[in-house]
Each structure stands twice: as C-alpha cells, then as structure tokens.
Image (spheres, rainbow, N blue to C red):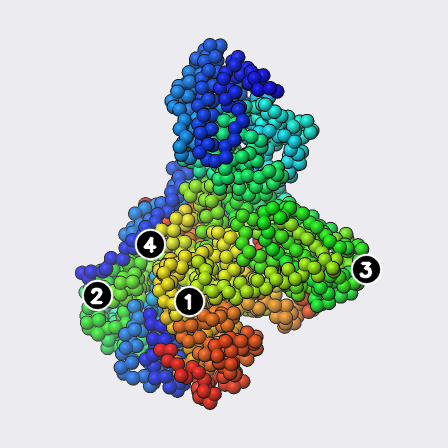
C-alpha cells in the first residue's frame, strides 16, 4: 500500500478543497488509509490517476451489493491478520426467502428477518441482505418474489438461481437495485457473467475449490464481469478454514488476481450452519447466506463478527453516562471508571458479582483504560466532577465515592472538587466484590 | 485448472509438547488446523471446569449437571462421560469469605478426581496468592508422579507454584494479561527460575465474546506467529479459559425474549469463544457448559481432521 | 589440642588408629596464588583418597566387603556419589572401586582443580558414611537427615529461605553471635563446622549460647571431612526438588547454579583438606568468601577481613535476594495515601518549598563506605520541634551495589516522591534542593518521627531497586549548620548530573534501548530510545530505560547493539534496523532516528507531539495533544493521530516526545529546527527558554518569532503567506520531497 506522501506527490497540490478536505495532504492521508477514493479529486490528471490506481489497486476487489445508503461493501481486504491492519468490510449475513412464498406468508417471512436485530454497546446488529432462492423452478415466480421482497425490504438482495433465464427475468425486474447474482457455475458462467455485465450487478460464483474458483473468475472477467464474489464450495469447517486461507493468502501475499475477490459461503440452518458461519467470519469470509438463523444464534454470531472486525487500534467505547447496577438507592456507593468497553464490562461484571447495588459513572476517556487515560490527562478530577454534575449522581445518593485504586493519587483533589468523601478502591477489578462487601459491612 | 500459488509458510519454530499420560498438548508447527503447513493432526484438549464452591457459580450452568455438581469428584466424572480430556478444578471456595476449603480438602478432592476419572487435572485457586500457594503446594506434593498443571503464576507471584511444580514434576500455568510481551516475560521469568520450557503452559487471558475477544484473538495469533517464527520463549502450549462467556450479561440474560433461549445462547456464546480461541492458537480449552464443550470438541476434531 | 593428639582423634572417628595423611591434610599453608591453590587441592585430594582407602580396608575387616555404605534417615545412600555418579547402592567394596577409578589428581588447570575437588568430595562422603555404619539415627553433629530437607521443603526452592551460608575454619575471636543473628534475621540457613586444631564455629556458637541444631536452622556438620555434609545436603535438595535424575550431571549442575543459593565463609589459614573441598564447593556453584591469604577469583573467591561484611559479600556474590520485611510505621502506608492533600492548618512542621533550606539526594558510594541498614538523624527530631515551625531538612540516601551505576542515581532519587507520599499525613513535592515536605499534626501525634522518614526511604529504595543496590544507608539532617555544610557537595552532584545529561550524546554511548510497552495496542511499534531522543510518550528517557533494563532484564527496555553506523545524518544504524525488524516481525525493516521522511520511527499512539510536513513541502508543523484546533496541514491532532498511530511508519508524519524538539538531533536529516514553521502557542510557551536557546545555538535567534501559531493562522494559505512575509528559513531549504 502506498504511503500518504506517495499519494500526495501525485495530487495537484492546489488545496482547492473540492474533495471536501482542507488540503491535498489531508486527502492523501485518507487515500493511504483507504478512507477516500481517487475519483473524489476532480482535478487529478489522467496520468496521475493511472499511476495512483496502480499503487492504490487493491489486492482484493471491493464489491458492493445494493444501492444507496444500505449498500453493503465486501472485500477490499489487505492483510491476513487483524493486528496488521483493521479488517475493512465485515462479513455480511443474508437470510433466505424462497420463491414458493407469496402474499401474507412472504410478508411475514420478510418481517421476521427484519425483526432479527439487536443493540449492543451502542451498535445495531442486523441481517444485511435477503437471498431470494429460486426453488420453484419458475422464472416468472422468481422475478415476482424478487419484486415483492424488494418492495418491503430496503437492504440489498441476492438472487439465488442456477437458471440464467430465471436470473434474467429477475434482473429485468430488480436489476437496478444491484442485487448479487448468485449461481454462476462451470455450466452457465458465460451467460451469468454476461448478465452481470449487462445489469452492472455483482456476480457470485459457485465453485468447488480455490482452483476452480480462479478458473471461473478468469472466465467471468473475460466476458466483462468485474465485481465477483467467490463461493469456494466449502462443504465443511476444515475446507472452509483451509480454502479461505489459501485464497486470502494467494490474493494478499502472492498478488494472485484470480482469487482477489471477496469470499462467500452458502450454509443451511441449525448448529452446523452457525459453526460454518463463525469460521467464515473469523477466516476471511465476506458473505454467509443462511436458510435461517435463530436469535440465540444470531446475537453471539453478530457479536463475534463485531469483535473480529473492530479496528484493533480504536477501542470499543461505551457512552459517558450513569449506569445503575442492581437497583442502587440513596445510600449506595458511587464508582466510576473509563469508557473503554473492556474496562466497563469487567467492572460491571465484578460489581454484579458482589450483589451490592452501585451507581457506576462512566467517564468518556476516548476508549483509553484507567492508567493510560490518567497518563493522557483524560481521567482527571475536573473531568470526573463534570461528569458527576452532568448525571447528577451526587444528588441521587449520599454514598461514598470510590476512586479506582490505580489512580488513588487523585483522591485528594477529587475530594476537594466534589465535596464528598472519597474512598480508595482496589487496583484490580476482580477485588471489587470483596471490597464492596467490606465497605457495606462497616 | 488455474495454478493457485503455494501459500505454505515456512516456519522455523514448533510448540513444545507436554504429555499428561495419553493426553498431549502442544506440538503445532504451523498455524492452527492448516494441514498444508501444520503437520500436527491434534485437536485442543478440552478441560471441563469443576468448582469446589457453587456460591458464585451460575445456576443455569449448574442445572446442566443433574445435581452431580454438588460433589466435585462426581462432577468430574460426569465431565469424563461427556468426553472431556482433562478436569480444571478451581478452588474458589478457598477464599476466606467463601466456604474456606483447606489445602487438605483440596488434596482429597483432586486425588478423588484423579482416581475416579483417570484424567489429568489442572488446579487453580481463588486468586488470593497465599491461599493458592498453599493449595498448590499441598496438591502438588500429594500428586507427585501424576502430571498436572498448577496455576496460576503471575509476574510477582510465581516462585512457590513453580517450586512445587519443579519438585513434583508438574507443569505450570503462566498467566499474563492480554499482552504478548508480558506473556513472553512470564515465560522468561519461569525459565530463569528453573522451570523447564517443556513444563510451562501459558494463559494469555482469553477474553470472552463481546468482552474483549478481539484483543485475545489478536494477542493469541501474535503469540503463535512469533512462536512459529522462532521465538523460543513463546513456544509453549496455550491455555484458553472460555468460561468468561458466562459473565457476559447478553449471553445469560433472561429478561429480553427477543434475544432467544438463554441456554442455547450461552452455549453458543461459550462455543464461539472456544472456536475463536482454537483458531487463534489454543492448545487447551477450559469449558463450563457441557453443550459448548461438546461443540468445541466435535468442531475441533473436524478442523484437525481427527474425527 | 596439639597436632598429633588431634590427628589421632580424627583417625579414631574414622575407625583407624592413625594415618599420616591426616597431618598432611590439616597442615596450614598459605596459597597466595591460583597455581599453589591448585597444587594444594591436588595434594589434599590424593591424601583424602588414600585415607579413605585405609578406612575402607579397616571397615571391610570389621563389617565385611558386602556391607552397604549409607547414612541413616536418608533415601540417597551416599548422596554425593548417588547424585553425581548415579550409584544408588554403594558397598564398601564398591566404594573402594570407586576410589580406585579416580586416579591421582592433577594441578595445572581449573578443570584439574574441579576434578580434584570432586574426588575429594567422594572420599570425604565415604569417610563420613563409614562413621555411620550400623547407626539407626542421624542424631549427632554431621549428616543432616532427609526429613530436615523435607521440612524446609519448598522454602528452599521458592526462596522463602533466600540462601545458606557454610562456616568453615577457625572461628578465632570472631563475634559469632552477631554473625548468627545476621544470618537468622535474613531468614537464611547456617551450616557450621567444628574445629580440629582450634576452636571452630560450632563450638564457639555453643559457648556463646547460640542455638545450634537441626531444629534451629543452624546445622552442625562436625569436624574434618564433615564439611561434605554441606555438599550432600545441597545435592539432595536438587534431587528432591529439582526433579533431577541421579547421575544427570548437566541438569544437576544447572539446578545447583540456581539454588540452593549457598556460599562458604572460610576464616583462618587454609589446609589441604579445605583446599580440595573448596573446589567441590565451586562445583556446586557456591562461592567462597575468606580472610585467608588466597587469590581473589571473580565469582569464586572473594576476600574480606570483617565477618559482618563477609556475609554481605557472600550474599551479593551469590545473588541472594533477601526478602524485604514489611514496613512497620505508626501511620498508614500505601498508594492509597499518595493523593492526600495536606493543608497548612493540619501541618505540624514543613521544610523546603523556598521557605527553608532543604535538599534530597541519592548517591552511590564505595562498598566500604556504607553500613547497610543504618539510619542516622543529625539534629532535632519532630518531638523536639515547635508545632507550626518551618524546619531545614536534608534527606541523603547512600547506596552500594555491584551493578550500581551513577547514571541511575537520579532515576532512584525521583522515587523518593512516591516513597514519601505513600505515608499517611506526610506530603512531598519537588526535587533536589527545591523539594518541599509537610508532616501532619496527626502523624506526629501518632508517633511519627524522622527516623521513620529514613525507614520509608530505605524501604522504597530497597523495594524498587533491590536488584541493583544491596547496601543502603540513610541520613536525615535537621541541623541547619550541618545541612549548609553538606549542600555544596550535593549541588555539585546535581551539576555533574546535569552536565552528564547534556553531554549524553548518541555518539558517545554503546547502546540504545527499546521500549515495547505499547506493543499491546500497536503491535508493529517499537520505540528506540537514545540519549538524544526520548520515548515518544515523553515519559522514558535513555537513563530511565537503562534503569528499567537493570531492574527487569526481560522487561520492555532491552539494550540495542547499535552495530554499524549506516548514515550519520539520518541516524541509521544496522543494529537498530535489526532490532526493529525483529520486534515488528519483519514489517518494519529500517528506522532512521533523525529523519521524518526516510524510514521514520513508527508511532504507537501515546506521542506527546506530532510532526507533520506542510502542504508546500517546505516545512513542518508541530501539534501537541492539548491543542484541539485545526492546523495548517488541514488535519487536527486527533485526525493525524488516528492516521499515523498503531505502529506504522508514515513518512512525512511522526509522533515524538516533547523534549525531542529541543534535541540537537531533531529531524536532523531534514535540517532540524529551521524546518518548523508552526506550532500551537501553548506548546511554544511551554518549550520557552529552552527552544529560544536552541535557536540561538544554531545562529538563528529570531527563528522563534518566525514560527507561526494558531493566532496567526491555521490554514495552509495563511501559513505560506506568513512564511513569505517573515522570510522563514525553511523557504530557502530543499523541499522535503
């Protein structure tokens, strides 16, 4: 990947701001971090553009499905391990609607899929796509179901059929929505690729292994289909892990273009499907299509996805707020800590273990942990006292304020600022239950 | 057919093997389960968790053991029936504010488990150094000749447990807090102290799904990559305790029906934690729920190609 | 006891009437150099073997050649033979064969000496074992039964018992009571021999009512060959606790080199028996501290005439860490009191803070200048002072340690702050001769005295730096005259340190240090800390890193061999490249310490300041963490930080520690200070005089005024206009790209 300076060299350096950035340098920085596209610069010379496209040419193509705000991007990955650099586009999950449904049952099915979602740490987890599966064998019906679903589902769609005629029919109807054409195999690759080109829709290729996927990808490209998603036909967990690894390494480390596309899996439902999806999520899958997913499966799976695709350099944060734990009252103690999600969850779990109600005030430290935040000046008595004011916690309880043991040295100043007795707590979260019990027994 | 370039990595390092009778941990010479570079076909060891005091143990988990959880030996035996390879006994009750399990009682429990199940045992304490040291000392001495894992050693508290292990031929569990350098430092401290590298297992803290799993996943991967690249001080089997999944509110909550059945949900929560652990390098998995343990075993067998 | 009578008594101990070897072995001889020591050892070894043969022959006559030789109450037969040779069952006949197989000792090399020592050890162990034939119990001076080792148990391994001292030779008129107390107060084991020709340690201790015995951790070994019981104790500990298989010499050696941590104190003139067994001690990694006329051999033989000091030397030589007693104070002590605020009305007395003369100093001294543990108060104590008074106060900590370096003094001195503040009701701020201390009324009422202050300092230094300093002495002074008399010397030390700091140049040191503290969140990042470029967090300079390495060799600060200087201007060294490459698993292969554009240092996330190239490529702007506004490069600190952090190299952008800005090596490859065209006003004020001075030093006294800030402009065009207006020197320089 080129550095910001390398991009900068090729930009006009006029600081015209037409790209939305105040300077060309700032724009170059975005390019280097893959947060902007070369096309965003209207003044770039053709020459530079070519040079930049070359150096910015992704090892793995970014393929987008759907249109507008709900479009889902897949691929564009540059590394093998997330500690090297953030995985860019998280695995998309699609649920199936068969084209033998219509009327109320169809609507119920789509509604059920729409309802499958959660909110966790201020983030919304939901299904990303619906795959319309051609089980009827009837092209008209397939196209009809696609149309019907598209009218009540505003996120991207997948058209799942091995029948080029059915596919064409459906594309004629909803092609403008840029669905994923899923069903190109050795038998129909030319036809399907031609449809992909004609409608400008991405093409999902069903192969048997990395080799055949590479072959089919080359064929599809020859016909002019450029946005490909590869299904390596993994029948089980082991093949999924190994073949996905082979494809990703070949693309990213060996710059092997025929496998430089996002990967997908088609699974069924139930326990094994979830396991497949989990392996695919951790190991380089960009899309998993399920027959169905229970909410008790979806929540852990989507949490896994969120964990894997978190930027390792940007900690997950919780909101600065007052969190009552276990129904605290007017004498309950006040504890506070940083908004680093890991810190919050750990402290919260340990307070819950004590079974003693506590007012837990979270301070926005931009996701830093206690000591780091303190060292960086983001966890100061001033800030804490402000947060107390904002939440009004001190008017809700006359209980003691417990300062994290690691920052005991702030206790004096904090006590002066808030005018409330401050108790020094424990250094480690796991000692909280013991400390709270001792405190309340006194 | 297209010629996909070979993507096999040439590693120079190999993870130490530790044998607990027929139960062997470690030995990998490539990234987990990749048969094109890792010559080892071995799945991680599944260690079933047993505690001596149910005071803080989740009821939902206890219900899964048909009352046999009331007797640690019987509980361990149930784990064996379910298919666990090892028992991880945690003496949480040794803390003074709990039932106060004594070192002598701990010895009798561990001996009972070992006699009854014939499985290797990992012995952990309550987190209070003095107490844990006394338990490790008593159990380690009493179980001389039957190789166990004694834990946990930490940066400022490792000498006693290391000494017991060296004296009695046990392995040590080296704990570090989500940091590859600290993990390495622990192993250096232990080897400097005289513990053989082939008697060290490391616990880099497996944070559960939704509780920092992202950190653990990457720390584990980095540890394993560094070990395979030749860093001797990281070439020891990795222990991942997945039971933290039960501390996640979203995993066990029964308040919100839209989250689906809690028993199934927590099973997945723990199983996915275990899957992430094994894909990032775990050699020993500590599991709480029988369902999750079973999934971890079955999936790892399939991934390792030993089913 | 006269020589011949003593020899006969020894002979009878081993079951024979007399033997000329005994006289030979006990003859006191000087061995002023290594060759003569080797000869003595060889002669001693041969004599001992010869003596043992005679005694075996006599024992065979009495008990039969099939008689198994073994000590009572042990499972290890004749332990030295079992451990080193792997022979579990040794008959008298087998013992004779063993001795026959040893051959006569040579004396030319150190290996010869060790071989002689080993042979002598077997002979001695066999001799002693013969005295136990038929005995059921080990109930006299001599062999220490297995049960004692088991009772001591893990304490021997986990260093709860930090070590053992073996006392050997003439006790003469030594103060054995003090010595025994010293050993016991440190929780160590003592092993004492009896004398043959004159009074030995065991007798002298008993005479002085020091409890000697198996239950007192002061074990009597008996006389003559009884020394071997220290060795057979040592090897049994290794077999019992080290899991070492009998006969596995390599692992046995390796284990003994770690523990039990024993050393030998030998007083009085040496004889051949002791010379030979001294080498056996070395084979067990036990160094010898002696007042005899012996050559000093580093790591093996150390000399001293002072018994109290001999123990200290043994401890230091063997690397024994004496466990720190918990600090017992009349007031609370711990980190929870660190943040305490002590107001004037609650203050009993205060010192310094420009109200009175005060200073604090930690200085390293020679080994002989320090009495470990001594706390001296010169002047009045708190109870003799008026409430509310302002006093003068000097706190002087003097230290010694084999590994101590004067460079570490300032690092240790800085820990006084937390060491004092940890006490409830004691408050400290500042440093050197601008420190300020308050002691509360409550603390004084609870009985806090200035000696307690001394104990706190001693405890702090020992706790934090016990690995480096082994002797500490504290002096607290409240007497103004005395303080004023000592202040000039202290000021001179401060000056020397400052000069040293200023004189610390990258070219003049032989290693840099890494800091890998941030790798947990920035895996590819590694800080290379050189004297002229501190860590980018600003918290760790070269001296801190050096101290960090001394304290925790396996920690985040490791030395970096610099290797070949590849580019002087850019600050590129081959060794730095290697180290960076290995720490980043090959992602970063080069790092130039003084360059912004070519292979700059990676940035983790905790940098104090970011350097960024300007859009005209002529200059750089600096922006610090506290400045939240826009910068002329079009990015705020937070945007820049997000783009360059995480352990990547981003040419044109780099995170640095604030102090690096005024370093002579500040982006030297790009022309240094004159490149700076903009920085936030507050940062400029903070750098203040130091920056102004640097500008003068490079002959651009007006540069400071040519550096713009946010009040002048915060956009690219504005900056370019400003630079043209003030004719900024960067405009005359080569573009950065």
Identify the subunit bearing mark 1: C
Q: Residue, x 41% and y 30% (percent of image)?
A: C107
Left or right? Give the position of B264 relative to C180: left
Quadrant showing the N terminus of chain C? top right
Q: Position of residue C594 (x, y in %)?
A: 42, 69
Mark carried by residue A216 = 2
**Residue A235's quadrant in the figure?**
bottom left
User: Which of labels 3 and 2 is toward the front?
Assistant: 3
Q: Separation of disc 3 and disc 4 at Cα?
A: 81 Å
Q: Separation of disc 3 and disc 2 at Cα?
A: 94 Å
Q: Element at badge 2? A: helix
Q: Are marks 4 and 2 on the same chain?
A: yes
Q: Residue, x 58% and y 59% (percent of image)?
A: C410
Q: Residue, x 29% and y 80% (percent of image)?
A: A49
Q: Are marks 3 and 4 in contact (CB under 8 Å)?
A: no
Mark 2 packing: few (<14 Cα in 10 Å), some, or many (20+)? many
Mark carried by residue C593 = 1
Of residues B230 and C211, which is closer to you in this image?
C211
Q: Are marks 3 and 2 on the same chain?
A: no
Q: Are marks 3 and 4 on the same chain?
A: no
Mark carried by residue A237 = 4
Mark carried by residue C386 = 3
Of residues C17 and A28, which is closer to you in this image?
C17
Q: Position of residue A186 (x, y in %)?
A: 20, 64
């Amino acid at each position: 990947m080129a550095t910001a300076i390398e991009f900068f060299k090729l930009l006009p350096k006029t600081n015209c701001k037409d790209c939305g950035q105040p300077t060309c340098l700032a724009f170059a920085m975005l390019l280097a971090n893959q947060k902007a596209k070369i096309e965003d610069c209207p003044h770039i010379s053709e020459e530079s553009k070519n040079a930049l496209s070359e150096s910015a040419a992704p090892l793995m193509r970014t393929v987008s499905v759907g249109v507008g705000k709900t479009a889902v991007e897949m691929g564009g990955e540059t590394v093998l391990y997330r500690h090297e650099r953030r995985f860019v586009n998280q695995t998309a999950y699609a649920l199936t609607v068969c084209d033998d449904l219509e009327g109320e049952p169809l609507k119920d099915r789509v509604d059920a899929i729409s309802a499958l979602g959660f909110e966790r740490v201020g983030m919304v987890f939901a299904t990303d796509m619906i795959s319309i599966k051609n089980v009827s064998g009837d092209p008209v019906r397939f196209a009809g179901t696609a149309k019907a679903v598209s009218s009540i589902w505003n996120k991207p769609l997948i058209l799942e059929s091995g029948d080029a005629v059915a596919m064409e029919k459906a594309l004629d109807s909803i092609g403008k929505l840029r669905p994923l054409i899923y069903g190109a195999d050795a038998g129909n690759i030319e036809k399907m690729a031609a449809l992909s080109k004609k409608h400008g829709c991405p093409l999902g290729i069903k192969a048997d292994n990395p080799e055949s996927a590479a072959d089919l990808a080359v064929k599809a490209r020859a016909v002019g289909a450029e946005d490909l998603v590869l299904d390596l036909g993994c029948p089980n967990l082991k093949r999924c892990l190994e073949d996905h690894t082979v494809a990703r390494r070949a693309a990213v480390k060996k710059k092997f273009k025929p496998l430089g596309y996002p990967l997908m899996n088609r699974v069924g439902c139930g326990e094994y499907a979830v396991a497949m999806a989990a392996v695919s999520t951790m190991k380089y899958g960009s899309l998993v299509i399920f027959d169905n997913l229970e909410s008790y499966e979806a929540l852990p799976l989507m949490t896994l996805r969120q964990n894997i695709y978190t930027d390792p350099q940007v900690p997950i944060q919780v909101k600065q707020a007052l969190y009552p734990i276990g129904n605290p009252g007017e004498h309950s103690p006040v504890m506070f800590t940083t908004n680093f999600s890991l810190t919050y969850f750990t402290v919260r779990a340990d307070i819950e273990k004590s079974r003693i109600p506590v007012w837990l005030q979270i301070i926005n430290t931009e996701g830093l942990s206690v000591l780091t935040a303190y060292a960086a000046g983001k966890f100061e008595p001033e800030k804490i006292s402000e947060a107390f004011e904002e939440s009004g916690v001190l008017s809700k309880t006359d209980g003691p304020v417990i300062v994290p043991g690691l920052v005991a040295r702030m206790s004096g100043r904090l006590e002066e600022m808030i005018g409330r007795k401050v108790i020094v707590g424990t250094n480690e979260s796991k000692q909280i239950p013991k400390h709270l019990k001792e405190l309340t027994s006194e | 057919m297209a010629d996909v370039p070979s993507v096999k990595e040439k590693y120079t390092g190999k993870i130490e093997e530790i044998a607990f009778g027929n139960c062997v941990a470690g030995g990998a010479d490539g990234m987990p389960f990749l048969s094109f570079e890792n010559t080892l076909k071995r799945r991680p060891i599944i260690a079933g968790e047993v505690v001596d005091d149910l005071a803080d143990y989740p009821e939902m988990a206890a219900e899964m053991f048909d009352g046999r959880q009331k007797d640690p030996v019987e509980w361990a035996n149930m784990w064996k029936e379910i298919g666990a390879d090892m028992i991880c006994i945690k003496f949480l009750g040794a803390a003074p504010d709990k039932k106060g399990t004594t070192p002598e009682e701990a010895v009798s429990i561990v001996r009972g488990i070992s006699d009854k199940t014939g499985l290797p045992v990992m012995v952990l304490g309550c987190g209070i150094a003095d107490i844990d040291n006394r338990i490790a000392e008593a159990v380690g001495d009493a179980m001389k000749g039957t190789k166990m894992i004694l834990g946990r050693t930490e940066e400022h508290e490792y000498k006693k447990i290391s000494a017991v292990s060296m004296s009695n031929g046990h392995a040590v569990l080296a704990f570090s807090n989500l940091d590859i350098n600290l993990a390495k430092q622990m192993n250096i401290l232990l080897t400097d102290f005289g513990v053989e590298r082939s008697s060290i297992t490391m616990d880099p803290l497996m944070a559960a799904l939704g509780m920092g799993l992202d950190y653990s996943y990457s720390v584990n991967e980095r540890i394993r990559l560094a070990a395979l690249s030749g860093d001797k001080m990281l070439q020891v089997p990795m222990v991942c305790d997945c039971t933290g999944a039960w501390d996640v509110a979203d995993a066990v909550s029964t308040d919100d029906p839209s989250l689906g059945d809690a028993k199934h949900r927590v099973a997945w929560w723990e199983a996915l934690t275990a899957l992430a652990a094994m894909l990032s390098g775990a050699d020993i998995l500590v599991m709480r729920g029988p369902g999750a343990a079973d999934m971890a075993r079955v999936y790892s067998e399939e991934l390792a190609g030993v089913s | 006891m006269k020589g011949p009578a003593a020899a006969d008594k020894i002979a009878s101990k081993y079951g024979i009437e007399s033997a000329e070897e005994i006289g030979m072995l006990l003859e006191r001889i000087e061995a002023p150099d290594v060759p003569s020591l080797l000869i003595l050892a060889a002669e001693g070894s041969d004599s001992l073997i010869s003596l043992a043969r005679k005694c075996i022959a006599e024992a065979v006559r009495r008990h039969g050649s099939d008689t198994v030789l073994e000590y009572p109450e042990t499972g290890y037969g004749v332990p030295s033979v079992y451990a080193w040779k792997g022979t579990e069952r040794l008959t008298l006949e087998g013992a004779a064969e063993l001795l026959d197989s040893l051959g006569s000792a040579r004396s030319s090399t150190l290996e010869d000496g060790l071989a002689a020592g080993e042979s002598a050890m077997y002979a001695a162990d066999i001799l002693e074992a013969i005295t136990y034939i038929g005995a059921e119990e080990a109930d006299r001076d001599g062999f220490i039964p297995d049960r004692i080792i088991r009772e001591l148990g893990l304490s021997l391994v986990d260093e709860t018992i930090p070590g053992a001292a073996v006392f050997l030779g003439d006790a003469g008129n030594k103060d054995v009571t003090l010595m025994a107390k010293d050993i016991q107060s440190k929780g160590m084991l003592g092993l004492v021999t009896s004398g043959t020709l004159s009074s030995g340690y065991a007798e002298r201790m008993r005479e002085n009512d020091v409890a000697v015995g198996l239950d007192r951790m002061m074990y009597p070994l008996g006389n003559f060959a009884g020394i071997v019981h220290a060795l057979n104790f040592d090897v049994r500990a290794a077999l019992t606790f080290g899991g070492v298989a009998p006969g596995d010499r390599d692992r046995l050696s390796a284990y003994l080199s770690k523990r039990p941590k024993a050393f030998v104190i030998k007083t009085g003139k040496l004889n051949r028996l002791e010379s030979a067994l001294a080498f056996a001690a070395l084979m067990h990694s036990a160094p010898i501290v002696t007042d005899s006329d012996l050559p000093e051999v580093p790591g093996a033989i150390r000399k001293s005439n002072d018994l109290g000091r001999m123990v200290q030397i043994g401890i230091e030589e063997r690397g024994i860490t004496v466990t720190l007693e918990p600090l017992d104070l009349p007031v609370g002590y711990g980190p929870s009191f660190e943040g305490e605020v002590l107001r004037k009305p609650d203050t009993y007395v205060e010192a310094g803070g420009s109200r009175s003369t005060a200073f604090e100093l930690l200085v390293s001294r020679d080994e002989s200048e320090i009495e470990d543990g001594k706390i001296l108060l010169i002047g009045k104590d708190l109870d003799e002072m008026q409430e509310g008074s302002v006093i003068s106060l000097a706190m002087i900590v003097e230290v010694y340690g084999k590994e101590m370096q004067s460079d570490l003094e300032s690092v240790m001195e800085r820990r006084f702050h937390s060491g004092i503040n940890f006490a409830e009701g004691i408050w400290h701020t500042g440093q050197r001769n601008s420190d300020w201390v308050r002691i509360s009324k409550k603390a004084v009422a609870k009985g806090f005295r200035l000696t307690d202050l001394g104990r706190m300092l001693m405890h702090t230094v020992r706790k934090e730096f016990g690995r480096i300093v082994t002797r500490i002495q504290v002096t607290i002074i409240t007497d103004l005259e005395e303080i004023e008399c000592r202040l000039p010397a202290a000021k001179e030390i401060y000056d020397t340190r400052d000069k040293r700091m200023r004189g610390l140049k990258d070219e003049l040191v032989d290693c840099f240090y890494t800091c890998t503290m941030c790798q947990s969140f920035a895996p590819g990042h590694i800080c290379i800390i050189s004297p002229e470029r501190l860590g980018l967090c600003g918290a760790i300079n070269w001296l801190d890193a050096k101290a960090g390495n001394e304290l925790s060799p396996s920690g985040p600060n490791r030395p970096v061999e610099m290797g070949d200087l590849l580019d002087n201007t850019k600050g590129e060294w081959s060794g730095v490249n290697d180290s960076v490459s290995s720490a980043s698993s090959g992602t970063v292969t080069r790092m130039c310490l003084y360059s912004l554009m070519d292979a700059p240092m990676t940035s983790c996330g905790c940098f104090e300041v970011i350097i960024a190239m300007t859009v005209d490529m002529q200059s750089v702007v600096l922006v610090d963490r506290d400045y939240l506004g826009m910068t002329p490069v079009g990015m705020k600190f937070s945007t820049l930080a997000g783009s360059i952090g995480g352990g990547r190299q981003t040419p044109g952008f780099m995170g640095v520690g604030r102090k690096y800005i005024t370093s002579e090596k500040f982006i030297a490859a790009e022309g240094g200070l004159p490149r700076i065209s903009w920085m936030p006003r507050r940062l400029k004020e903070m750098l203040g005089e130091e920056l102004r001075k640097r500008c003068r030093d490079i002959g651009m006294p007006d540069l400071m005024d040519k550096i713009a800030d946010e009040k002048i402009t915060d956009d690219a065009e504005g900056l370019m206009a400003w630079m043209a207006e003030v004719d900024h020197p960067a405009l005359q320089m080569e573009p950065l790209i």
